[in-house]
Structure formats: structure tokens, C-alpha cells
Image: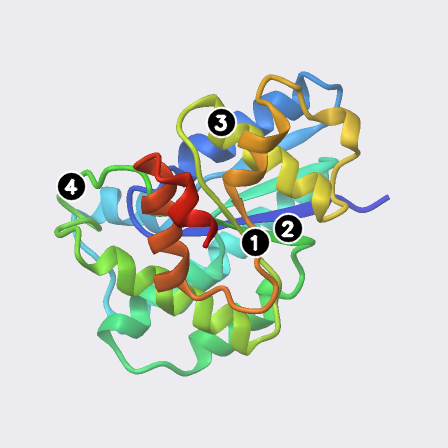
Amino acid sequence: MSARRIALLGAESTGKTRLSTELAAHLRGRGLRAVAVPEVLREWCTREGRTPRPEEQLAIAQEQERRTDDAAAQADIVIADTTALMVAVYAGMLFPEGELLRFAIDRQKRYDTTLLTGLDLPWVADGLQRDAAQPREEVDALLRSLLQGAQLAFQVIYGQGPQRLDSALQALVSAGVLPAGIVDRTVDTDARRAWVWVCEKCSDPACEHRLFKLARSGDEDAAAR
């Protein structure tokens, strides 16, 4: 049986790395061979002390997918933090798109499901990839646009601490990637539903973010309207 592939996408400081490692650890604790594949772009920026030039982007995206393929050869579940699509998104914000985006979309179609991490976590600068909080919404919107344009389904994950992990697990169950018994019942059902965005007709980030802020403020009546 081939490995199930889970793609984690999201803007800066949205908890992708922590979520990928927590998901892998949780699934290993349930007897599955689960592997989290680290973000190659981050490794590259840390090693080189800068962001990549246009001609360097494709090789980084290809290395990301090669590592995912290698992990899939020896695992039941592969959690990719992230995929070639994130490289293409960052490159597209700075340079003209082309072969890189075509490669990234083709590879994204090979994942069993995609989780998009929400913008509810605070932004933290890292001196390399992250130099301002404002582009997060631009990255988030661009990811949604590319996924929708390629007709690739995704679910948006919100929540703090254990709630974020629980929401991700529930989303994977909903997508048919994991069996229902894999989710710990540590968060009540109503709370769990509130932290997974599954609107099938819209996925409008402006609408979603407005509802999220209302829910966070405790205005449940307004959020329901």
C-alpha cells in the first residue's frame, strides 16, 4: 500500500512546522509509520543567509518533492512541511512565474489532501523569510487562488495548541486520509467544528477571517448570522 501524502501549506508564522511534527508524533503513537518532511526553502535560506534568486527556485522545489518521495517509500503517512507550491508562491510574489508554478501544481495534485494553516497565530520575524506581517494575507489569498484554480480541495485549520492538532486530525478524518478512531476526543465536538473551515461554496478569506474574529471575540450570535 502506498503512503498517504498530506500537504501543509500556509503563510508565515502559521504553525506549519509545529503542526507537522505534532501530527507525525501523534500518528506514530498510534502505530503508524509517519514522517514529517521539513521545509527545504527554510533550510536553504538558513544555510545561505539570504533568499534564493529566480534561477535557484526550481531546484529548491524539486528537492522538496524529492524528499517527500523518499519519505513515502518507507512510511505509511507523509506530512510535507511544505510543498513545491509554497516555493512557487513566494517566487511568484517577487519574480515572473513559469516552469516553477507548472511543476508545483502538477506535484500538488499527487497529495491525498491539503491543509491550509489559518492566520490566527501571531506573526514572528525570523530575519530571513519573514520581514513583515502584512504579506501573510497576500500569501494566504494567493494560495487559495492557486488551489481553487487547479481544482484542488483544501481545509483551513485554526486553533491554539492541542486544539490546532485536534482540528487537523479531524480534517484528515473528514478527507478520508485517517480512520475516525485516530482522533483523541479531548476537544468537544462543537469546538472542533468551529476550528476547521470547510465551506464548499466560498472559501472567501475575507468572509472567513471576519467570522473567525467574531468567534474569537465571543460574539457567537453575530458569527452565526
Quadrant of the rendering where the N terminus is positioned: top right
Which one is nearer the viewer's eye here, 201 or 8?
Answer: 201
* Comparing labels 3 and 1, the label whose residue is closer to the camera: 3
How far separated are the C-alphas under marks 2 and 3? 30 Å
Q: Position of residue 141 (x, y in %)?
A: 36, 66
Which one is nearer the viewer's eye here, 133 or 63?
Answer: 133
- Identify which residue is drawn at 17% across, 57% down: 134
* Comparing labels 2 and 3, the label whose residue is closer to the camera: 3
Neighbour tally class for label 2: few under 14, some 14-19, many 20 plus, Cα within 10 Å: some
Q: Earlier in the sequence, mark 4 or mark 3?
A: 4
Which one is nearer the viewer's eye here, 175 or 82?
Answer: 175
Do residues under tags 2 and 3 come within 8 Å of each other at their CB atoms? no
Q: Which mark is residue 125?
A: 4
Q: Earlier in the sequence, mark 3 or mark 1?
A: 1
Q: Which mark is residue 69?
A: 2
Q: Earlier in the sequence, mark 2 or mark 3?
A: 2
Amino acid under label 4? Ala
Q: Secondary structure at mark 4?
A: loop
- Identify which residue is drawn at 31% across, 49% down: 44
- Identify which residue is drawn at 35% across, 51% down: 41
- Identify which residue is drawn at 67% across, 61% down: 110
For residue 142, above or below residue 131: below
Residue under label 3: 163
* Comparing labels 1 and 4, the label whose residue is closer to the camera: 4
Neighbour tally class for label 1: few under 14, some 14-19, many 20 plus, Cα within 10 Å: few
Q: Position of residue 83 (x, y in %)?
A: 49, 55
Asked if residue 51 lies left or right of residue 115, the reply is: left
Question: Image quadrant of residue 17?
Answer: top left
Residue under label 1: 66
